[in-house]
């Protein structure tokens, strides 16, 4: 197994890219800057605690906003950009021939690239969180490490998930152009379209059921719709992050509409279905690392160079 | 044991057959040249050996391992200089060699390897700034890591200047002396001639000949070109008579004062005798041995042996201005 060799090569290569330098700087400014702004300027000293930025979730029913969601959007974009070309670019330049003329199996290549590029993204992210930490300490903010540290870990996992998604697109695409378009399309789905799709599917099922004289119960429809929303890794991350600061029932209602909340609210308080528990959603987030990488390997293994 | 064994290998891409029913054995310790014009299927064959592409049909064994199922085991003992590759622009030359050392899990000294290919001075520069020839050397350095039992070189001298090509040849010979099997493809004949024990000639995906260079020379029917200087112009009748002689492939006028005759070695005397019998004064004649280039063209174009350039027997060569060329073929 020489995936370590591939991972080291990927890391050494990516660490020298200007894109990464830019991303690192961005994370430092974005995370550190937001922390400095909120805790140093906007919030009165009494409110200076981590949860008021990193645990800030606003849901206006038709529109929800949170700092973790914003971070996830940016991180998803940067992580995808770091990995979507990892195989197609090597194909196009021909460096893949050097890579595979050495005794690296195609599995070594996929695993090595996933780990190498993930390390780079996580490193950039950690620099950003380090800047945050400095800002937190400097402003005398209450650290709430019990929630903040797990949140850093969750964020890192989300980054790795998007590296994995980009890598799989790179393995599936025939050209760099195709990989670029597929990545942009998928990002658009995650960032914009997913909610509508998730709400549409139960409606469609209900419509189909009505055609054969049956119907889907309101509660089932809403539960399915909300669950589908949380399959989106951006939302999985967001609700898990919220779960670090609030009780699970409240965290799960994070991206729901008023209608959905009316139906689901009391049910979640009484008993949490297993697919809404933190653990299940955490496994779902891990699956966003494992499944795309597996699909990528499956595709790459079959391809002629 | 055979280092490389191809048995009935066919590779079809969507609409083209790149390699067709290719069977070939390369013995251990042999230097084997794989010749053919561009697009003949050389690179496809090499890509199959390395599991870059998978054959549509046929069995491939390299160093005793199945090339598909045990490709990593094959590549652990094989050094490869691929064709149409590129380096990692941001990594230094040394980082490339270190990557090869890591992948092969050996403990070579990267500087020694770089020194061997003449890149010691550029070791710390990013490879993106290397010239084509330097990139080629770098890939060779990566191939040499871990003392491979087999070297697979696809068009190794492309991008190299003559001095670089010579160094490449010397390294190949050094490796061969240490018992390394060398399999390399080329369309440049003098290199093949200089280092190869045997050559295989590929045309349109099919292996049309495999032999030693001498063997190939003997195998082609026309192995000599005879230049005959004559006192007077030769008329068409005499030209046809010479063309009809046993063992003569073609006769051309080479200006007014000379003829070029492609024939078997033992037909030379008959040609001269025939001319003299018909009253043509033969003032001088030279024979030229068919070069590998001729053989190559003969095999790859499917035509007869064309012009030769290696002069075997010296004499006063005469060559008039080619005013008129009449060709008579048997």
Image (cartoon, rainbow, N blue to C red):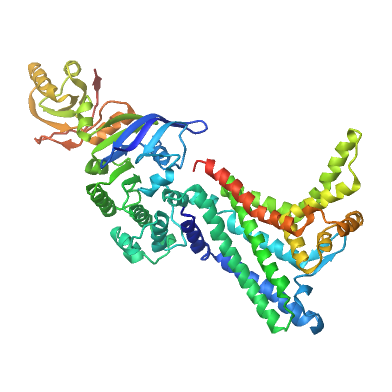
Residue B51 drawn at (x, y percent): 44, 41
Is A13 positioned to the left or the right of B146 in the image? right
Q: Position of residue B139 (x, y in %)?
A: 37, 54
Q: Residue at x 19, y 33 (%)?
A: B214
Extreme residue toward the front, this view: A271
Q: Report the number of numbered marks.
A: 0
Q: Is residue B185 left or right of residue A78?
A: left
Picture layout, residue A103 above or below residue B41: below
| In the image, residue A246 above or below residue A40 | above
The structure residue drawn at horizontal position 77% and vertical position 52%, both measured from the top left corner, is A194
- In terms of depth relative to the viewer, which is nearer, B231 or B264? B264
Question: Residue B84: horizontal and vertical position, in percent?
Answer: 42, 47
Q: Can you tell which quarter of the image residue B215 is in? A: top left
Whether residue B38 is visible to the viewer of this picture, yes or no, is no
> Which one is nearer the viewer's eye here, A280 or B27?
A280
Residue A157 in sight here = yes
Residue at x-position 36% and y-position 65%: B123
- The answer to which quarter of the image holds residue A258 is bottom right
> In x, y percent, where is residue A144?
73, 76
Most foreground residue, A146 or A28:
A146
A229 versus A32 height, above or below: above
Q: Considering only vertical position in the picture, is A32 above or below B25?
A: below
């Amino acid at each position: 197994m020489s995936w370590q060799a591939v991972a080291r090569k990927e890391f050494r290569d990516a660490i020298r890219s200007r894109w990464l330098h830019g991303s690192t700087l961005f994370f430092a400014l974005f995370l550190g800057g937001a922390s400095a702004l909120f805790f140093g300027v906007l919030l009165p000293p009494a409110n200076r605690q981590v949860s008021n930025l990193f645990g800030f979730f606003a849901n206006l029913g038709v529109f929800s906003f949170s700092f973790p969601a914003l971070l996830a959007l940016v991180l998803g974009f940067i992580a995808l950009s770091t990995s979507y070309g990892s195989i197609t670019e090597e194909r196009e330049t021909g460096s893949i021939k050097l890579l595979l003329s050495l005794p690296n199996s195609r599995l070594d290549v996929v695993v090595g690239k996933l780990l190498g590029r993930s390390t780079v993204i996580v490193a950039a992210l950690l620099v950003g969180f380090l800047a945050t930490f400095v800002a937190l300490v400097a402003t005398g903010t209450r650290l709430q490490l019990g929630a903040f540290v797990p949140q850093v870990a969750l964020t890192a996992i989300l980054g790795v998930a998007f590296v994995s998604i980009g890598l799989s697109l790179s393995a599936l695409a025939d050209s760099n152009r195709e990989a670029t378009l597929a990545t942009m399309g998928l990002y658009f789905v995650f960032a914009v379209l997913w909610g509508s799709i998730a709400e549409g599917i139960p409606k469609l099922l209900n419509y189909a059921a009505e055609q054969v004289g049956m119907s889907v119960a309101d509660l089932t429809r809403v539960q399915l719709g909300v669950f589908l929303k949380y399959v989106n890794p951006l939302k999985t991350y967001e609700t898990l992050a919220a779960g670090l600061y609030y009780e699970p029932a409240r965290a799960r209602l994070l991206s729901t509409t008023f209608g959905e909340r009316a139906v689901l609210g009391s049910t979640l308080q009484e008993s949490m279905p297993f697919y809404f528990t933190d653990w299940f959603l955490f496994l779902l987030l891990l699956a966003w690392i494992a499944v795309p990488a597996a699909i990528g390997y499956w595709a790459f293994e079959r391809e002629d160079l | 044991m055979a280092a490389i064994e191809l048995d009935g290998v066919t590779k079809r891409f969507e609409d083209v057959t790149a390699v067709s029913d290719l069977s070939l054995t390369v013995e251990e310790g042999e230097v084997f040249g794989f010749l053919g014009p561009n697009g003949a299927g050389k690179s496809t064959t090499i890509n199959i050996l390395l599991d870059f592409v998978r054959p549509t049909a046929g069995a491939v064994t390299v160093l005793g391992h199945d090339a598909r199922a045990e490709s990593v085991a094959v590549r652990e003992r094989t050094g490869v200089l691929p064709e149409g590759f590129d380096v990692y622009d941001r990594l230094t030359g040394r980082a490339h060699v270190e990557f090869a050392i890591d992948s092969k899990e050996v403990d070579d000294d990267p500087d020694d390897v770089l020194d061997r290919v003449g890149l010691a001075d550029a070791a710390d520069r990013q490879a993106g700034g290397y010239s084509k020839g330097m990139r080629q050397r770098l890939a060779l350095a990566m191939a040499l890591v871990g003392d491979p039992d087999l070297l697979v070189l696809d068009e190794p001298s492309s991008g190299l200047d003559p001095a670089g090509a010579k160094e490449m040849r010397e390294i190949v010979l050094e490796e061969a002396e240490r018992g390394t099997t060398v399999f390399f493809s080329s369309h440049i004949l003098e290199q093949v001639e200089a280092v190869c024990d045997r050559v295989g000639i590929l045309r349109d995906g099919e292996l049309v000949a495999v032999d030693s260079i001498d063997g190939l020379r003997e195998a082609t029917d026309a192995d000599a070109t005879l230049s005959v200087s004559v006192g007077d112009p030769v008329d068409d009748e005499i030209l046809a008579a010479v063309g009809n002689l046993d063992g003569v492939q073609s006769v051309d006028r080479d200006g007014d004062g000379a003829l070029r005759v492609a024939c078997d070695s033992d037909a030379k005397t008959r040609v001269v005798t025939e001319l003299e019998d018909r009253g043509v004064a033969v003032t001088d004649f030279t024979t030229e041995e068919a070069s590998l280039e001729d053989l190559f063209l003969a095999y790859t174009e499917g035509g007869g042996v064309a012009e030769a350039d290696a002069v075997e027997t010296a004499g006063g060569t005469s060559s008039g201005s080619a005013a008129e060329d009449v060709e008579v073929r048997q």
